[in-house]
Image: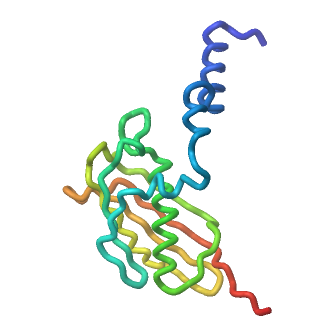
Amino acid sequence: MKKEGNEETSMESVKKFLEKEGEMAITMDGLPERFFEPFIMKGIQVDLLEPGRIVCSFKVPPRLLNGGNFMHGGATATLVDLIGSAAILTVGTPTGVSVEINVSYLDSAYPGEEVEVEVEAKALRVGKVVGVASVELSKKKTSKIIAQGSHTKYLALASKL
């Protein structure tokens, strides 16, 4: 199959984007190990913490924006992961590994907009083996839902040795 000029350029652009070549690579190489969680979580304010329920808030920082200038879906999914995990921990269960994370994106959050993360970790189910948290991100001012997520974790069992 013969490649056209525009297709070739497009393929090269995709490769550069995925491999983070050039200037972006230099920036990425300078990052410390395990920077990801602090990168996402910096600025989170815990407003309520009780067994099975966490409410947090934050203003959307520029570092979490995508090319469209609103909060990146990956940042939203990471919040569902990390805050959902924390909610499962509030009921005294050991942490485990993610089995499934589901996020429905319903609206956008923009730079500086205040977002509330209600991790009603309705610890929907926290048993001996599996824990499930429900996470909702909404605009603090209007209560309009930005995203709804669920996070299922396989819980680490204590060793009987």
- Tell me which residue sits at (35%, 68%) in the image: 118
In the image, residue 2 above or below residue 99 = above
Describe residue 6's horizontal placement relative to residue 56 as left or right.
right
Name, please, the residue furthest toward the top: 5
Whole-percent x, y for residue 96 in the image:
63, 74
In this figure, what is the number of numbered marks? Answer: 0
Q: Position of residue 33 (x, y in %)?
A: 61, 52
x, y percent for residue 126: 54, 83
- Please give the name of the residue rendered at 30% of the width and 43% of the height, measured from the top-left corner: 111
Instruction: List the single residue furthest toward the bottom.
Output: 160
Left or right, 151 with respect to 112, comes to: right
Going by the image, does 10 lie left or right of 138? right
Which image quarter: residue 20?
Answer: top right
Quadrant where the C terminus is found in the figure: bottom right
Along the viewing direction, whichever of 36 and 80 lies nearer the viewer: 36
Residue situated furthest left in the rendering = 141
Is 56 placed above or below 4 here? below
Observer-nearest residue: 154 or 36?
36
Placement of the N terminus among the 4 image quadrants: top right
User: Foreground residue, 143 or 12?
Assistant: 12
Q: Residue 136, image x and y in percent?
A: 38, 63
Residue at left offset 46%, top offset 47%: 73
Q: Residue at x 60, y 32 (%)?
A: 25
Figure colour scheme:
rainbow
